Image (cartoon, rainbow, N blue to C red):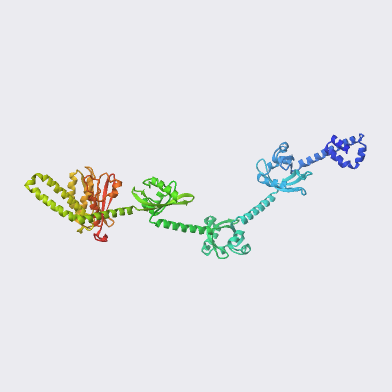
Amino acid sequence: MLVKREIVKKNNKDLDMWWEKVLEPDLQSLIEDLSTNRVKCIAENLILGMQRQLLLHQKRYEVLVNTTSDLVVCFSTDGKISLANQAFCRFIQKSPGEVVGSNFLDFVYEADQGGIISLLSSIPLDKPELTFSGRMVKPDGSISWQEWDTQAIFNEEGTIVELQAVGHPVSDVWQIERVLKESETYYRAIFENTGTAMMIYKYDMSIVLVNSEFEKLSGYSREEIEHRMKWTEFIHEDDLDRMINYHFQRQVDSESVPNNYEFRLRDRWGHIKNIFLTVALIGDNQTVVVSFMDITERKRMEQALLQSERKYMTILNTCPNEIAITTIEEGRFIDVNFQACKTLGLSYDEIVGHTSQELELWVNPQDRVELVNLLKQTGLVKNQEYTMRVHNGREITALVSAEIWDFDGTQCMILIINDISEKKKMENELARLEQLNLIGEMAASIGHEVRNPMTSVRGFLQLLKDKPQFELYNEYFNLMIEELDCANHIITEFLSMARHKNVDLRLSNLNAIILSAVPSIRAEVLAQNKELELQLNPIDDLMLDHNEIRQLLYNLSRNALESMAPGKKVIIKTYGKDNQVILAVKDQGSGIPKNIINKIGVPFFTTKEKGNGLGLAVSYSIAARHQGSIQLETSPSGTTFFVSFPLPEASLAGPE
């Protein structure tokens, strides 16, 4: 063994291995002759002989490899090429120097690389041969199918150190068969595993193929369906004619009928299912492939949603209150009901999508901030009173209730608005009338008791005034008599406010009464350098007390004149409207401040230096005794008082 080690040191490992195999049986004789030169000569001769044989085999191998038309390539498990024949180099149009050291996978079609790597890395030691097919990419980008016969070379540890592959083109027939096979595999996989019920039937509507999903949908097994049942057996009778017409029309002109539509399917147990169908012709138009989507639950939910929306819209639009849904932060309207549109004087489209700020809904914008803060704190607001503005600029008093509501992920609030403007107006009117009535009752109670002594005092003052000894005091007597007359006039107006004052109602024409009073009114108008205009339209006769109507007209005219500067005009107008006759007295003054509008008609309330605050109060009482009412409209350009009188046939009761 020591000699062998010396030989190993002096020679290469291949020689050592050869020595080990060839000389080991004669190892003893070799050791005995170590001292001679004979061993050295034999070894050298053997090495030369082996080298010649190796060169000869290598030459034969190279000739064989390079003369074959097959592609020959050797590469490592990571794809690095160590040898490639001329056919392979010609195939990829590169020189041997460019090919050796490059990666085999660089020439493989990208979609096939993963599969080839997986195949080559899993070759077992006991079965090192492998045949596989793959697509190679030529320099011009064209694809060539190659079948590779591969041999794996293993080391002593059983690890692949090299792969030797011989490739040859795959025939067109093989490729076609392979594509067809793959297509059929893909088709069957899709047909069976699509997750949607599918069916294939023929021109005569006989079913040739269904998948497992259709089995679940219909309740029948494949064995019961395929080549045994017709497609029409599953169609609801009300949809049958339509489906049959579609089928035969599709054979003639496929574009004339829809490819997607709904119908009702009856399953094994008679249950009706709503189906969304997609249909297509294949082959020679004698075969039809159909997919079915069960939309029964969706249809049920759609119907439930539709009914819910109808209920919502019915409740929303039949509610007498104004209802709106707005975002909390912006106040942008999401939905409103009909009553809200009516009150605001805007259409649905003019409101939804806009903010309350854009619509100038809040008279005081801070009110909305207060409402939102209160809502965030408590989550619910009930009957908060606010002043709002509608489309024509009219302000209304509203009771607002609100609650936070999540609408499609957006924090909103639902507002319920109760317009109490008329209610407030009626409350104020009732309060005012009650006050007038109270004063009238008091005047009726004490008027005569006060007037009688006043009459006596006036009479005695008149007698004393005419005596010669009191001649020096005539001026004082006249002043006292005038004051008594003024007090008597006030008592008379007090008595005019009594609800139970007797009135002499006669069928009369309001225009005639106005014309009879015009001379007196016009005289006062001219004296103040102002103008009077009459706009008397044809009107129906009314049940009127002439004296009271004249008093009403004088009061309203005097009030209008006192509110205007010289050169301005008073307009007295009459017209008919909604079973009523309207008397309108309009001035061109500066209007009535908003903060005192509610006090108009209250006894003794006046803004005039010499007024007693009874003129309008008496006018309201006169209108009430005629079952009428008084409203006013005011602006910086003037004020109009509207007195409404019901027609006789519209009156429900006589004067109180």
Observer-nearest residue: 299 or 375? Answer: 375
Q: Is residue 422 left or right of residue 161?
A: left
The residue at the far left in this view is 468
Let me know if residue 512 appears in the view: no
Let me know if residue 560 appears in the view: yes
Quarter of the image that includes the N terminus: top right
Residue 451 lies, in percent from the top left, at 17, 54
Quadrant position of residue 79: top right
Observer-nearest residue: 15 or 237? Answer: 15
Residue beneath the point at 45% across and 56% down: 309
138 shown above or below 492? above
Q: Is residue 123 left or right of residue 577?
A: right
Observer-nearest residue: 613 or 225? Answer: 613
Residue 65 lies, in percent from the top left, at 77, 42
Observer-nearest residue: 525 or 189? Answer: 525
The residue at the far bottom in this view is 269
Quadrant position of residue 247: bottom right
Q: Is residue 100 left or right of residue 356?
A: right
Residue 650 lies, in percent from the top left, at 27, 60
Quarter of the image that includes the C terminus: bottom left
Residue 121 lies, in percent from the top left, at 72, 46
How many marks the image carries: the answer is 0
